[in-house]
Image (spheres, rainbow, N blue to C red):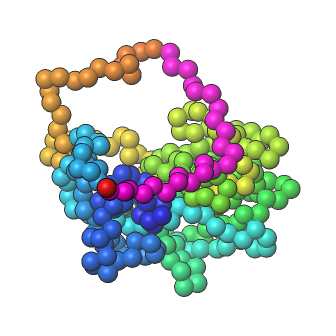
Amino acid sequence: MSILTRLQPFHTSASDFGVMKFLKKGIDVKKYTMRPLPLQKSGGRGHDGRIQTHGVGGGAKHHYRMVDFKKDGPREGPPLEEKVCYVRYDPCRTADIAVVATGEKRRYILASQNMKAGDIIKTSRNIPRIPVRAYEGDSHPVGALPVGTMVHNLEIYEDDFGRIARAAGTSAQLVRKIGDKCILRMPSKREICISQHCMATVGRVSNIDHDKEHIGSPQRSRWLGIRPQSGWWHRKTGYNGRKIRPIPPMKTYSKPPPPKPDSHKYSF
């Protein structure tokens, strides 16, 4: 699997399928790098040239930075400590990102709400008998955290990477524990049941006022890559209007789905 496919939080076929564009420039997409990669815009089109997302096109040029959503620490002994070098803006996502370093290794991670340069964050996979004292920015298994803790960058399968609560200002809440399972409430208010060994980062994602940001002009929308819509006809779906929408039932993630079988094309 491409490292861009594993780390990026948004759809762009230019990154998933345009491998040759990177190979010609000497960029290995299967290896993590801190180097900002040139990102070619897809214009809302897929690899087959057809429209996959309407209202997307144009915008300012920007580079892609590989954000590592994997939280891997020791299962026994002292936790892994990393120092926050600086927090910066990322044009490819709504949240800010931070550069953390330990030893000779550096990487990009999602910045939490109050994260700043000089902070020390800890990562551990140990689940003690007594819940740990949760500090913002630290990463622990959800089974090691006290009930009521707000977390983000949450795994849904053990030894996977963070998939839930990665947008600006979002977080999930640990509601209760049942045996070796933990129940969490997602930003959509739906509850999920995952293993107690799934990793999560304590706190909310940074840039919490993103939903209150006012664009202000149609020109800025074009800079952000948002194309205009027709003012003559707007589709009205069932989402419009006031109605009672019951919360979907709890979803359980027990084990990851099996990999898809290899497909081969034959021509006659």
Task: Say if the magenta span includes residue 219.
Answer: no
Q: Nearer the viewer, residue 146 or 231?
A: 231
Q: Is residue 233 left or right of residue 211?
A: left
Q: Nearer the viewer, residue 94 or 6?
A: 6
Please indicate, yes or no, whether residue 98 appears anywhere in the rendered image: no
Residue 151 position, x and y percent, is: 61, 50
Residue 162 position, x and y percent, is: 56, 55
Residue extent of the magenta highlight: 244-267
Residue 50 position, x and y percent, is: 24, 45
Tell me the residue at 72%/55% (across/down).
197
Does 163 appear above or below 5?
above
Farthest-out residue, bottom: 104
> Is the magenta region chiefly helix, strand or loop?
loop
Farthest-out residue, front: 268
Please indicate, yes or no, whether residue 54 appears anywhere in the rendered image: yes
Tell me the residue at 29%/60% (across/down).
14
Does 180 appear above or below 137?
above
Tell me the residue at 53%/80% (across/down).
105
Tell me the residue at 67%/49% (across/down).
255
Task: Say if the magenta span includes residue 256.
Answer: yes
Q: How many marks?
A: 0
For the C terminus, which image quadrant?
bottom left
Which image quarter: residue 54? top left
Q: Is residue 220 left or right of residue 145?
A: left
Residue 230 position, x and y percent, is: 15, 30
